[in-house]
Image: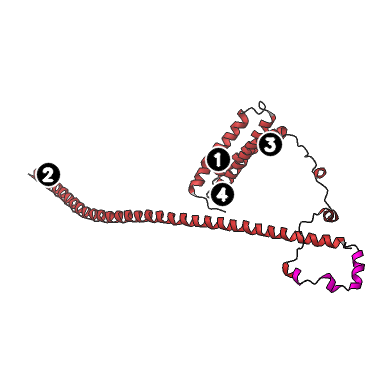
């Protein structure tokens, strides 16, 4: 819970009665039936929001009022009663003017059916083929060296079509999937590097701004220090002058009092002498 300052406490105490009176006046004086139904509903929503804010102000003011008297408790209870009445009226108006709820359209019919893996393998185009390098071509033996002459004639009559097409298609899919994964990882690395560069730039700007702020604050602190030192010297001089003046004024005051006493004694003596004579 954050600590509230004296200014915020005073602000809430001043604004609470005004807000409650404004809400009570809006309920009693405003006409809630002239505007359209939608405008009335929006107005009721705004009034309910202000009522919630007023309740929060009442709670904060009551918590901050440590030495609450019976008069304060009665005032808080009266404010709560007024807010309850206003909220009941506005809630009734809001329920009457609320727009009817409409059921949204179904999303399931618009979703396409998933495609099976067998169909993907059947429709997948061949994007890459295995091409041997020059070294493998030169080092590979010829068919005449590997196959005897008695079997070459039989192999010439057989068709050169592989018997396992699914295996070939799966190998082709693995070959085409590898460049896609590499491209995705490369794009992800580039995006991360760009974000790191942006973060480094922002950090450098923040450091520069912080250093500039420190320089400005340092100059302000030095100026305030000079002014405080000047005020301290001036107050020391004034203290010495005040001490001297107090000593002089004290001696003068004693002299005046003694003079008055001497005059009074002389006057009384003169009166006695006159009466005796």
Residue 151 in magenta stretch: yes
* Disc 3 from disc 1: Cα separation: 21 Å
Give x and y (percent) for residue 20: 58, 37
* Nearer to the camera, 70 or 14: 14
Q: Residues within 10 Å of mark 4 (few under 14, many from 20)?
A: few
Q: Give the spatial CA distance, label 3 vs label 2.
A: 95 Å
Whether tag 3 and tag 2 are in contact, CB under 8 A, the answer is no
Residue identifier under label 1:
16
Q: Report the mark closest to the observer, 3 or 2.
A: 3
Cα distance between the residues tagged 3 and 4: 27 Å
- Mark 3 or 4, nearer chain start: 4
Q: Is residue 189 above or below residue 152?
A: above
N-term-proximal mark, 2 vs 4: 4
Looking at the image, is mark 1 or mark 2 earlier in the sequence? 1
Q: Residues in magenta? A: 136-160
Badge 1 density bin: few <14, some 14–19, many ≥20, Cα 10 Å: some
Residue at coordinates 11% horizontally, 46% vertically from top-left?
Answer: 272
Q: Residues within 10 Å of mark 2 (few under 14, many from 20)?
A: few
Is residue 150 found left or right of 244 in the rendered image?
Answer: right
The reply to whether the C-beta atoms of the residues labelled 1 and 2 are less than 8 Å apart is no
Q: Which residue is mark 4?
A: 63
Quadrant in the picture for the N terminus:
bottom right
Which residue has dot 2 on it?
Answer: 271
**How far across and down, in percent of the image, does residue 28 sit?**
62, 30
Residue 240 bears which disc, if any? none
Question: CA gap, disc 1 to disc 2?
Answer: 75 Å
Question: Mark 3 or mark 2, which has the lower sequence index?
Answer: 3
Of callouts 3 and 1, the N-terminal one: 1
Residue occupying image coordinates x 80% and y 62%: 171
| Secondary structure beneath label 3 | helix
- In reply to whether residue 255 is colored magenta, the answer given is no
Label of residue 91 in the image: 3
């Amino acid at each position: 819970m954050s600590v509230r300052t004296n200014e915020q406490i005073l602000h809430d105490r001043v604004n609470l009665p005004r807000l409650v009176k404004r809400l009570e006046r809006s309920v009693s004086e405003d006409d809630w039936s002239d505007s359209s139904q939608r405008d009335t509903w929006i107005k009721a929503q705004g009034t309910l929001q202000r009522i919630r804010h007023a309740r929060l102000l009442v709670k904060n003011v009551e918590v901050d009022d440590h030495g609450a008297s019976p008069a304060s408790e009665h005032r808080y209870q009266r404010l709560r009663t007024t807010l309850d009445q206003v909220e009941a009226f506005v809630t009734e108006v809001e329920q009457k003017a609320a727009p009817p709820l409409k059921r949204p359209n179904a999303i399931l019919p618009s979703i396409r059916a998933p495609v099976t893996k067998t169909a993907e393998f059947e429709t997948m185009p061949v994007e890459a083929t295995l091409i041997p390098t020059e070294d493998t071509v030169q080092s590979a033996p010829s068919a005449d060296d590997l196959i005897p002459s008695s079997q070459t004639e039989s192999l010439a009559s057989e068709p050169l079509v592989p018997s396992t097409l699914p295996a070939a298609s799966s190998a082709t899919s693995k070959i085409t999937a590898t460049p896609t994964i590499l491209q995705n990882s490369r794009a992800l690395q580039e995006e991360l590097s760009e974000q790191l560069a942006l973060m480094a730039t922002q950090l450098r700007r923040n450091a520069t701004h912080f250093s500039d702020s420190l320089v400005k604050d340092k100059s302000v602190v030095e100026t305030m220090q000079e002014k405080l030192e000047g005020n301290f010297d001036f107050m020391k001089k004034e203290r010495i002058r005040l001490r001297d003046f107090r000593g002089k004024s004290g001696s003068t005051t004693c002299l005046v009092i003694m003079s008055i006493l001497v005059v009074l004694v002389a006057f009384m003596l003169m009166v006695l002498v006159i009466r005796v004579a």
